[in-house]
Image (cartoon, rainbow, N blue to C red):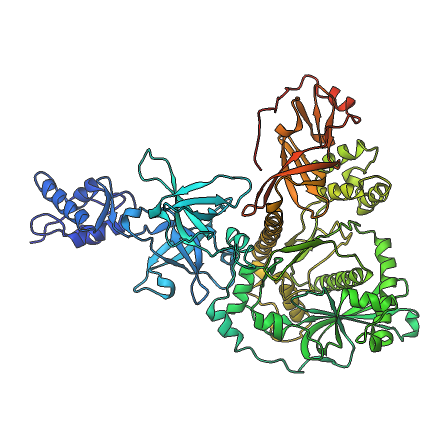
């Protein structure tokens, strides 16, 4: 007979195997496993005995069974916490580590006892249209697990449904492995904030080779043991040709390769037809882009308005590749595009938002080839004020692909052979329309921060050949202004149709940043009004005054730092920098998911086809907007870090060389400098500034010596010597050669009386 159990599970009534026991009053091994897997709390020897009613001398027999199960690898843990070996709890924390061939995210448990063998693989089950889609590689999630009947693609044996996304770690643990001749080696850091090397024992190398970028974990072999590094994945060699951006890609978890299922879906896309499309194939639309542009998704055309009621006016057409025709909501391509959020542009490569079949073929507005587009006709009066606009779906054929320099040269009287026949019917009307629109723009008064943008030119081996500052041309401003006008028109149309959309917003500077800016400008006898009366034109007046100072670029940079960060959101607060009440991104759906959403919204609002914004998408616009704002910031950080690494590699063989520089940042622990020729950023520890007590005067962005009264200030021109370059981290350390100046620091020094003094002669910080 089967005896009844007297015990209960730790939380509630006996379940499963705990309901019955063997004739001896002892559970079988299978029953023990079933009990452990169904237990809701901790489960050890005591809980098993209580659940199966084991008492007295039978406890010794139960202990023997548990020992056998531990010896044969069935159980793991101690007597108070037992579980099936290799078993995950029903709810656990996972780290997303990659994707399988179908594009599904693959994760591994964060907590795992290495004695249990290889970490199990978990496939994340994400809904097609939900906030789950902002989960990406490198993220951590709390998830509910279900065991799969058999291994799936990527070897997954569990499926997980995310409960919530957890706060992201500051960085993934990545470094460059340097092998030792005696075995093992070290991991060099890639994070300039934590320049710490880790030794690697021969048994912890994995499959890494010398120079590989590796992902590592810090493991502790015993309770009181010191953590040590162990390589868990080799990610390629960034020392190879054109591979240095590999570090930033993996450090930020940027999806690089497209899943096979996405690429297969690209092969099934249907060609557009003329149904419900306007025929613009005879209109000489032009694409005007950088010489090395990788995609061409916008084209422009202008003509004089023949309407007698708009004498001297213009009709400008902005045509944008019709990405929405090819990427339907909820498709594999759509989910992948949303996951990526945007394209990421490195000096040595592009990580695109869309597969090459779409971005470089179907939606690239190639010269002389028919392409589907979504276009807006903008009607301006002779003063550049917009009178009306109209969006249409159309078919176009680019009349010419021009670079900014080629278009500008044509207008300046040196047309190329390609531009010569386009002068009267395309280029001259475009510039005439721009001159009118520029008048209205200047009247509107957007923030006029025209900072020089340095560009890295690589040689055929992927190394820095030179750093250039491209000339800012009217051709650049023309395209920018027409794109802004098209973006405004998109927002206006969707508001008029009362359809939700994702705005591109830019808030006014915060009170804290504005106070810091005001304090700094007052040291230069310059002022900006208080927040209540603040407009972009106030900053423009300061920028105009700065032109008469020795460091106008410095004032521009300080003003830029005071600005809020632009972002995407369904809630409109306007765009402070552009001085616009409403603004949305419409003009780059190849490289920004926000623009694709706006395209779909326009198609739905104007009944332009069946592939508009869906009812399922609308409730999730807020979460999608937040996710793509995050991917945009991720891209900016990755691009900046890659530039720093390339320049650090470029300067690595010039240790000891001197450079002219400008102080670009002042902190309590040292100075940041920017080299004049390359724009490279580096750090000077305060210990190299001389044997003095230095006060950090935050309001004036200065370090001032308490004893000498001499100091250094933001914007000062200095000479520095390169002491150290760490290419893998993009870190440069310099020594100050220019003596501290006795500028107008008297008031600043007096203002520090009574403040704690700090001697930095023996203090050094690596940045």
Q: Please tell me in which quadrant of the rendered image residue 292 appears.
A: bottom right
When the figure is inspected, residue 95 is found, relative to residue 57, above or below; the finding is: below
The reply to whether residue 514 is visible in this rendering is yes
- Find residue 559 and report its horizontal and vertical position in percent: 75, 42
When the figure is inspected, residue 62 is found, relative to residue 269, above or below; the finding is: above
Residue at the spot 62% in from the left edge and 71% down from the top edge:
360
- Find residue 478 and report its horizontal and vertical position in percent: 80, 62
Residue at the spot 88% in from the left edge and 63% down from the top edge:
436
The reply to whether residue 380 is visible in this rendering is no
Quarter of the image for the C terminus: give it. top right
Horizontal placement of 77 versus 392: left or right?
left
Q: Please tell me in which quadrant of the rendered image residue 16 appears.
A: bottom left
Q: Please tell me in which quadrant of the rendered image residue 465 appears.
A: bottom right
Horizontal placement of 694 versus 300: left or right?
left
Residue at the spot 81% in from the left edge and 38% down from the top edge:
529
- Find residue 78 and report its horizontal and vertical position in percent: 23, 41
């Amino acid at each position: 007979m089967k005896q009844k159990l007297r015990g209960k599970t730790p939380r509630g009534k006996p379940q499963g195997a705990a309901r019955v026991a063997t004739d001896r009053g002892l559970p079988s091994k299978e029953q023990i496993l079933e009990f452990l897997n169904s237990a809701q709390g901790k489960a050890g020897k005591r809980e098993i005995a209580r659940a199966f009613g084991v008492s007295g001398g039978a406890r010794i027999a139960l202990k023997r069974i548990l020992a056998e199960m531990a010896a044969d690898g069935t159980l793991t843990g101690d007597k108070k916490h037992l579980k099936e070996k290799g078993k995950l709890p029903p709810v656990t924390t996972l780290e997303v580590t990659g994707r399988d061939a179908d594009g599904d995210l693959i994760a591994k448990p964060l907590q795992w006892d290495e004695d249990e063998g290889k970490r199990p693989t978990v496939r994340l089950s994400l809904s097609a249209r939900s906030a789950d889609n902002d989960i990406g590689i490198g993220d951590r999630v709390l998830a509910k697990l279900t065991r799969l009947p058999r291994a799936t693609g990527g070897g997954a044996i569990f499926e997980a449904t995310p409960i919530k996304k957890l706060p992201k770690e500051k960085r993934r643990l990545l470094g460059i492995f340097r092998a030792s001749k005696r075995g093992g080696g070290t991991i060099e850091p890639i994070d300039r904030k934590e320049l710490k090397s880790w030794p690697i024992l021969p048994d912890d190398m994995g499959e890494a080779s010398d120079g590989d970028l590796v992902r590592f974990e810090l493991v502790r072999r015993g309770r009181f043991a010191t953590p040590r590094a162990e390589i868990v994945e080799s990610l390629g060699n960034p020392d190879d040709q054109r591979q240095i951006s590999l570090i930033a890609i993996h450090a930020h978890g940027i999806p690089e390769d497209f899943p096979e299922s996405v690429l297969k879906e690209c092969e099934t896309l249907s060609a557009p037809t003329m149904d419900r499309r306007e025929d613009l194939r005879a209109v000489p639309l032009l694409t005007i882009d950088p010489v090395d542009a990788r995609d061409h998704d916008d084209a422009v055309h202008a003509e004089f308005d023949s309407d007698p009621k708009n004498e001297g006016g213009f009709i400008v057409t902005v045509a944008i590749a019709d990405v929405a025709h090819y990427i339907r909501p909820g498709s594999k391509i759509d989910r992948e595009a949303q996951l990526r959020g945007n394209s990421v542009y490195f000096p040595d490569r592009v990580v695109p938002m869309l597969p090459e079949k779409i971005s470089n073929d179907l939606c690239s507005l190639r010269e002389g080839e028919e392409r589907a587009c979504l276009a807006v006709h903008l009607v301006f009066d002779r003063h550049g004020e917009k009178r009306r606009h109209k969006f249409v779906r159309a078919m176009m054929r680019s009349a010419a692909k021009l670079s900014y320099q080629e278009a500008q040269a044509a207008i300046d009287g040196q047309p190329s052979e390609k531009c010569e026949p386009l002068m009267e019917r395309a280029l001259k009307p475009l510039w005439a329309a721009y001159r009118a629109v520029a008048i209205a723009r200047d009247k509107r008064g957007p923030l006029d921060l025209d900072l020089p943008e340095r560009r890295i030119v690589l040689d055929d081996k992927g190394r820095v050949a030179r750093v250039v500052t491209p000339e800012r041309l009217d051709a650049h401003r023309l395209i920018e202004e027409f794109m802004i006008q098209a973006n405004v028109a998109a927002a206006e149309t969707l508001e008029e149709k009362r359809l939700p959309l994702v705005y591109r917003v830019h808030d006014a500077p915060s009170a804290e940043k504005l106070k810091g800016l005001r304090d700094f400008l007052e040291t230069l006898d310059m002022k900006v009004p208080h927040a209540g009366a603040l407009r972009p034109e106030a900053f423009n007046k300061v920028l105009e005054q700065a032109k008469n100072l020795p460091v106008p670029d410095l004032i521009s940079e300080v003003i830029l730092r005071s600005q809020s960060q632009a972002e995407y959101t369904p809630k409109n607060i306007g765009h402070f920098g552009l001085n616009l009440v409403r603004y949305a991104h419409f003009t780059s759906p190849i490289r920004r998911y926000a623009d694709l959403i706006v395209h779909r919204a326009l198609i739905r609002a104007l009944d332009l086809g069946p592939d508009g914004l869906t009812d399922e998408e609308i409730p999730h616009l807020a979460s999608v907007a937040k996710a793509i704002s995050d991917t945009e910031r991720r891209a900016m950080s990755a691009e900046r870090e890659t530039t720093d690494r390339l320049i650090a590699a470029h300067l690595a063989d010039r240790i000891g060389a001197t450079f002219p520089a400008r102080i670009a940042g002042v902190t309590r622990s040292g100075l940041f400098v920017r080299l004049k020729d390359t724009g490279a950023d580096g750090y000077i520890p305060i210990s190299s500034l001389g044997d003095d007590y230095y006060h950090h005067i935050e309001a004036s962005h200065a370090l001032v010596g308490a004893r000498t009264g001499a100091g250094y200030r933001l914007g000062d021109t200095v000479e520095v010597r390169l002491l150290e370059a760490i290419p893998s981290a993009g870190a440069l350390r310099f020594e100050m050669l220019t003596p501290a100046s006795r500028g107008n620091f008297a008031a600043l020094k007096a203002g520090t009386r009574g403040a704690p003094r700090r001697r930095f002669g023996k203090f050094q910080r690596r940045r």
